[in-house]
Amino acid sequence: MAVPFYVSPDQIMQDKAEYARKGIAKGRSIVAVEYVDGLLLMAENPSASLNKISEIYDRIAFAGVGKYSEFENLRKAGIRYADLKGYSYSRQDVTTKSLANAYSETIGTIFTRDPKPLEVEILVVEVGETPAQNEMYHVSFDGTITDRRQFAVIGGQADRIRTYLQEHYRTDLPLAEALALSRQSLLAGYERPPAEESALEIGLLERGRVGRKFYRMTQAEAARAMAATNNGS
Amino acid sequence: MAGDRQATEGFEVSSRRIEKVYKADDYSVIAMAGAAGPCLEMIKLFQVEMEHYHKIEGETLALDGKANKLAQMVKQNLPAAFQGLIVIPIFAGYDLRLQQGRIFKYDVTGGRYEELQFYATGSGGKEARSTLKKFFKADMSREAALALAIEALVDAADIDVGTSGPDLIRGIYPVVKMVTCHGVTDVSNDELRPLSERLIAALQG
């Protein structure tokens, strides 16, 4: 019987992580930023129909980078999980923490068991009744889960964007300023500024909304909001 | 869409405040007659289905799609209906593609039929339909339509023991929802109270 070559678990995990990182690095980044009346998610996305940002439940939104088909499957699974839970128990029993943990478990299991890891990174965010109750979870390609405050970044250029946000973020930003900051931070992700800006996909979780808090903002609306405060450009 | 508030258990009133009309999604409303438990369960599931589809696909179902989905759910209830647990919905909404309001009625087998002007169902449905038939006009104002819906319920309650009219003593009024091209809105008790008082005063003759 042929004995397979021994490869140390260290090596296997390293190779998988490198593979996943490479896949994720190819795509653009997404930022999530807390502002005074909620949370905002912003992605550079040339496609108007293949979304990276989505509603999950009343207070919960999702964003994914990496391979579209893979994070799209995760998005749908999340919606199914949340709707089923809300239907069998009650709407307030659908919590972001348990959803993020379910994601972490799924992605982590695939990372260790399957030959090919998922080339995705996701954000699961919730707008709380007060700003202090906001929640943001970042789940990495290996299932590592971290919770964030104020802002969170995923995708290929995350380090540069995070540095920019660390320097420029302040608490209680109004929406228009949070939009401008997010856009500037995405631009800061480039080594050289691009010739023309790519289309933006924006999702908001607005605390003041009745029922489902998610709102998909069009780029025109965002431009108007930013122009109104004069520091948008 | 308007519904009275009474639930009966045999010959007893089991609730004076039950709600029979619900918002299905941003552009449609649903009401049911029959066994209360299965009715409420079906409405709850229907609401979840509409929201789930919207989130998964990123767009809402066409009004025809919603009406067909409901037909399938009624059909699935057929075995229970044979045992007496009947569920008969009315579904109405604003069709964003055709830019008009539409009403759908159902039979116990899941048959789906579109009504062009009005419909009423439940134990007092026939009486309510008579009133609607007599006074319906295609170009009614919002106020006239509201008054006619309440009048139909008052007439139904007059004849049918399973239907209650507006209860002025306890301050219980029908649940009324409006669907327009701007979405679903609830009609407040403040608006229903004077209408109900006028109709009941007319009964005193």
Image: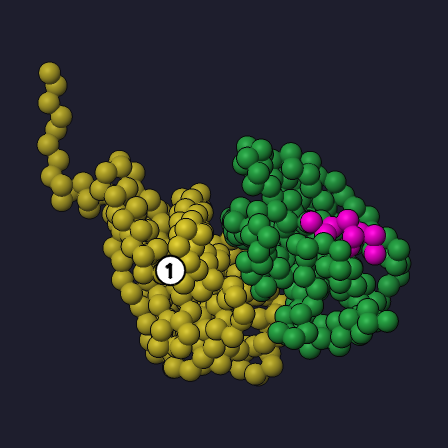
Chain colours: A yellow, B green
Name the residue: 66% across, 54% down.
B162
Q: Quadrant of the N terminus of chain B?
A: bottom right
Q: Is residue B73 above or below residue B191?
A: above
A11 magenta-colored = no
Viewer-side residue, A200 vs A215: A215
Principal secondary structure, stretch drawn in magenta: helix
Name the residue: 82% across, 48% down.
B116
Name the residue: 55% across, 32% down.
B79
B125 magenta-colored = yes
Q: Which residue position is annotated with label 1?
A: A93
Q: Is residue A133 left or right of residue B135?
A: left
Viewer-side residue, B136 vs A120: B136
Q: Is residue A79 above or below residue A201?
A: above
Percent from the top left, x then y, of residue B204?
Answer: 82, 72
Q: Quadrant of the C terminus of chain B?
A: bottom right
Label 1 marks which chain's residue?
Answer: A
Percent from the top left, x then y, of residue A207?
Answer: 48, 73
Name the residue: 61% across, 47% down.
B34
The answer to whether residue A191 of the structure is visible from this angle is: no
Question: On the image, which quarter does residue A94 sit in?
Answer: bottom left
Q: Is residue A35 above or below residue A99?
A: below
Tell me which amino acid carries mark 1: Asp
Disc 1, SS: helix
Question: On the image, which quarter does residue B192 sit in?
Answer: bottom right
Magenta-drawn segment? B123-131
Question: On the image, which quarter does residue A99 sit in?
Answer: bottom left
Percent from the top left, x then y, of residue A73?
Answer: 42, 44
